[in-house]
Image: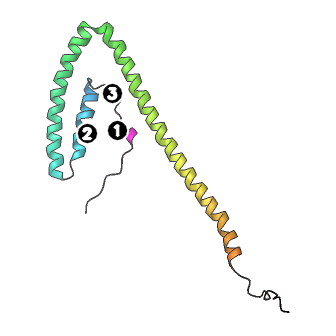
Amino acid sequence: MSTQPPTRLASEDVIINAPMSYAGSAQRIMRLRRLAHARWAVALLTILAVTLVLTAWVVVTGWYVISFGLLWIVTVPYRLLRRGSRKRKAEALRHRELMDTIQGAAAGSAAAIVTSTAAPELSVAETPAIDAPAPPTLTE
């Protein structure tokens, strides 16, 4: 018996941390684990991901030494601007998903209201009365 993981919203996949940070690089690399479905594949991809994270952290450490050690006056404002941009992108994506959900619920409610108000009118018009007299004919 296999269980399907719940579907993810697009906003859940947005990573706000910088790619050249310890947390951002680890989060991006750990996404590899989603590709596996079997237990052995998850274990293998986890080992691969941990190895890649450690390698990325060595590169990130070198990046920090160079960028913040030599170019800190340029790097700090740039990092702050980019983080703000990623946050706004994530917020816009969450807002779009919320609006889509609200519009879908409103459309469903409108359809239910139209169906419920139109159904009694149709049923009354289509059903003949049982005790109604026969319509008069021209010969009488």
Comparing labels 3 and 1, the label whose residue is closer to the camera: 1
Indicate the secondary structure of the residue bearing disc 2. Answer: helix
| Residue under the image location 32 percent in, 9 percent down | 74
Quote the CA–CA distance across marks 2 and 3. 14 Å
Magenta highlight range: 1-17
Residue 58 shown left or right of residue 23 in the figure: left
Q: Specify the farthest residue to the bottom.
A: 140
In this rendering, the answer to whether 59 lies above or below 43 is: above
Residue 129: image location, x then y, percent: 74, 83
Badge 2 or badge 3: first in the primary sequence: 3
| Residue under the image location 68 percent in, 76 percent down | 126
The image quarter containing residue 140 is: bottom right
Indicate the quadrant containing the N terminus: top left, top right, bottom left or bottom right.
bottom left
Mark 1 surroundings: few (<14), some (14-19) or many (≥20) residues within 10 A: few
Badge 2 or badge 1: first in the primary sequence: 1
Residue 2 painted magenta: yes
Quote the CA–CA distance across marks 3 and 1. 12 Å
What's the amino acid at mark 3? Answer: Asn
Q: Nearer the viewer, residue 26 or 7?
A: 7
Which residue matches tag 3?
Answer: 17
What's the amino acid at mark 1? Answer: Asp
> Are circles 2 and 1 on residues that touch, CB within 8 Å?
yes
Mark 3 surroundings: few (<14), some (14-19) or many (≥20) residues within 10 A: some
Residue 71: image location, x then y, percent: 27, 8
Residue 20: image location, x then y, percent: 26, 23
Which residue matches tag 2?
Answer: 31
Residue 108 shown left or right of residue 21 in the figure: right
Q: Nearer the viewer, residue 85 or 21?
A: 85
Which residue matches tag 1?
Answer: 13
Indicate the secondary structure of the residue bearing disc 3. Answer: loop
Q: Main secondary structure of the magenta part?
A: loop
